[in-house]
Image (cartoon, rainbow, N blue to C red):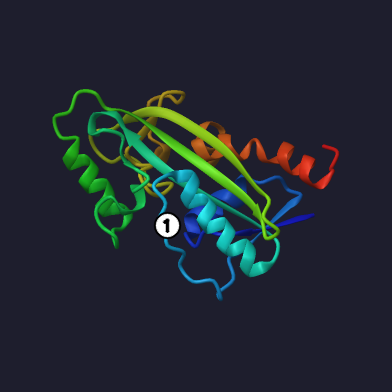
Amino acid sequence: MIRLVCASANPKKVEELARLLPIWVTLVPRPDSVGEVEETAPTLQGNAAIKAVEVANAVTGWAIADDTGLEVAAIGGEPGVRSARFAGEDADDASNRALLLQRMSGVVDRSARFRTVVALVDSKGEMHFLVGECAGTIASTERGDSGFGYDSLFIPHEGDGRTFAEMSAAEKDAISHRGRALAQLPELLSRLFGLKL
């Protein structure tokens, strides 16, 4: 078994990450000794790296982190890197979705994409990145009860017209940005640890 420490403290995100990892990878929760890590980088890759490096150094081992942004064409690619803080530094998911719907009121072009960057970092300084994207559109109202973040507003192109929040976990994982990024992880880990898949 390979042990990776998760840099995220978001329980919904941790649950999704754990679901997407190979069965031979154990995802360990972030230690309580590591406080909230400030995401100060201007890019998803930078923020993923900040979080992973902080945790890897704290546990003297391998850590995994991701940063995800929703990029909406009609509002200049916002919220992007500020997706979790779109409605303010202490905003919750509901506030962020409400602001997005407000900004998209009357907008015809509702195209958007989710973009995830996963950082895999070792305390010795080794660093690797995986990227996944999912294109879609923004719904005019919230639909569905599953998922988190903007899932109830995002309709993936490769789906059947449902939002992520209307899909089962397996359906979402098969086409999601995070699913696509983590689908590349087994091959990377096999190279790093000399495994035969």
Badge 1 marks a residue whose secondary structure is loop
User: Percent from the top left, x then y, of residue 138?
Assistant: 30, 32
Occupied quadrant, residue 191: top right
Residue in the foreground of this view, choosing between 72 and 192: 192
Q: Which residue is mark 1?
A: 39
Occupied quadrant, residue 26: bottom right
Residue in the foreground of this view, choosing between 124 and 31: 124
Figure check: 106 above or below 57 = above
Label total for image: 1
User: Percent from the top left, x then y, of residue 159?
Assistant: 45, 26
User: Which residue is most to the left?
Assistant: 106
Q: Is residue 154 left or right of residue 74?
A: right
Residue in the foreground of this view, choosing between 80 and 175: 80
Q: Is residue 75 left or right of residue 8?
A: left
User: Which residue is most to the front?
Assistant: 125
Mark 1 belongs to which amino acid? Glu
Q: Where does the C terminus fall, quadrant-wise?
A: top right
Q: Residue at x 45, y 67 (%)?
A: 36
Q: Residue at x 42, y 62 (%)?
A: 38
Residue in the foreground of this view, choosing between 55 and 155: 55
